[in-house]
Image (tube, rainbow, N blue to C red):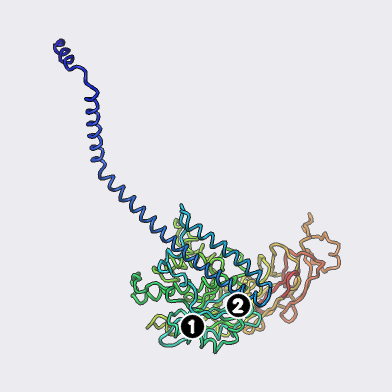
Amino acid sequence: MVSRLSLKITSMGPRTPKFWLVFCTAFLTLSFLAVVNRNDENGEYEYTVRLEELNVRLRNTELQSETRKAEVRHLQREIHKMREDVKRQNMSGPSLQYDTNHDKLAKLRSQLLQGQNNRNNSMMYILPTILQYMPHLIGKPDSLEPALHLSKGTAQVSIVIGVPTIKRDVESYIMETLSSLVAGLSTEEKLECLIVVFIAEVDLEYVKKEADRIQSNFHAELDSGLIEVISPRGSYYPDLNAVRETFGDTQERVKWRTKQNLDFSYLMMYAQSRGKYYVQLEDDLVAQPGYFTTMKTFAMQQQNKNWLLLEFSALGFIGKMFKTSDLNLIVEFFLMFHKDKPIDWLLDHILYVKVCNPEKDPKHCSREKAAYRIRYKPSQFQHIGLHSSLKGKVQKLKDKDFKKGFKRQFAHINPNADVSTTINNYMKFTLLKAYQGEDIFWGTTPSVGDIIKFRFIPPIVIGEYQFVSSNEQNPGDKFYNTTVEVLPSYQRDKKEGILEADNHQDNKFNRTQDGYIQVGKFQDGKAIGTVDADIGEVVELRLRVIEQPKNWVILSNIHIVPATKKR
């Protein structure tokens, strides 16, 4: 058996190279076909995914290209305008303004070149722009420019006030609103304020008619630059009839709230570069006299500099103050979801995203938001409109925290300090609110030795002080026989626990046993005076009751002025 097998194998003999070539070719072909058949379904899926990725990249590239084209066209118009200004100034002779325009022209050219280079170069990452949320603006570079623009170019003010207004079917309140805002400003406040009226309509005939009405009633304010009037172009808005219905709202309401989101965003974009703070109002309200200084002072006194929103009304989007440096973030968020939710919901969502921990309970979230969304009382604006800007809607909204005819001293910007007192306050009339200018301090009957203390962080040199007790409603709630005392920063503790001075000037001052220097005293409910410059930096100022009074006490005005500042 072995010999026959050996013979058979031997008889097969050697094979030629041609045979092996054919054999290998056939084997490889069959292997390839097997692999293709096995991976056919996976390969088709991969090709589909790859094709979709290429389509997405193509759309992004087209969007980026349109964005750059719009930027280039805008810069070209600015350059043309600048050249015309330069030509006119050259005809009238050289001036300082020519140099300024020449620098701006060079900067615009540089930006134009950079924009062209960015457009020509392929980019690994594509940054989002407003056009991704509002693609209807692509190819329409004029869409963000006002159709009507009455302006004196006022800028660098303290507060920009935005007042959007639309055509109402029943009754318009814009004139009453503007009259109240202007009447509530002092001459000095008008120099720090800009009121922008945004006529949010695309019917140019109506827009011009309304603008003429404002000019007729507020000619002096327009001429001085206190009031500006603008309106949008029709191309700024998308097709509002195509917005999908959400949250059970009717199509009419969805269109109204979507347009409102776009209107407020436009106004914020316009105001962003004009001042330090921006306040959003509505066109159917009245303002409290002194509202401007109240808002400005409250904003400047915030110890948390990261606040996002200060509220001067409890209603809707009335009296909402933002730092203009935050408006880019806010506008982008509004535009991102302008078709989805009302603007007051979106504002609350911004705060939730910024400060709330989803792993914590709602109470924790509310506490966190309270540090960034801060309410001022009493309200500075009252809603007066009966007929809403939404057609057919009647609303009888009134702010319960608005006190008609409410009178008190203007709030002052006091130095940063920790405040405390041994006098029990009545209800919510706390010392801290009085120091910040939000309200009065109202305390129960004090005892001898009770104090009100202000500890400055850091120590300051005090120039002047002013404390006024009682008010019109409670004229008898005054401080009597109460001293004003300061603690210099050069004091030091002795081992016996008695404060002693290290300053040779100290001997000329009237010192208390615990080291304070008396600098004044209440007379007829007031303590107004200055602090000797030789005292130097002061760590604390306190009011000390030295005789038992028979009544409750009120501090209606607290003003401490550092020596380096003037009132």
The numbered mark, 1 or 2, whose residue comes first in the sequence reads 2
For the point 48% across and 76% down, the residue is 315
Distance in Å between CA atoms under marks 1 and 2: 20 Å
For the N terminus, which image quadrant?
A: top left
Q: Position of residue 446 (x, y in %)?
A: 67, 73
User: Where on the picture, by quarter, is residue 449?
Assistant: bottom right
- For label 1, the crowd category at 10 Å Cα-Cα, with few meaning under 14, some 14 to 19 and many 20 or more, is many
Front-lying residue, 38 or 500: 38
Q: Residue furthest top?
A: 3
The residue pinned by badge 1 equals 284
Q: Is residue 351 above or below residue 181?
A: above
The residue pinned by badge 2 equals 193
Residue 547 located left or right of residue 299: right
Q: Do the numbered discs 1 and 2 sit on residues whose CB atoms are within 8 Å?
A: no
Regarding mark 2 in the picture, which secondary structure is present there? strand
For the C terminus, which image quadrant?
A: bottom right
Q: Residue furthest bottom?
A: 216
Residue 223 located left or right of residue 369: right
Q: Mark 1 is on which residue type? A: Asp
Between disc 1 and disc 2, the foreground one is 2
Front-lying residue, 91 or 283: 91
Q: Is residue 93 above or below residue 456?
A: below
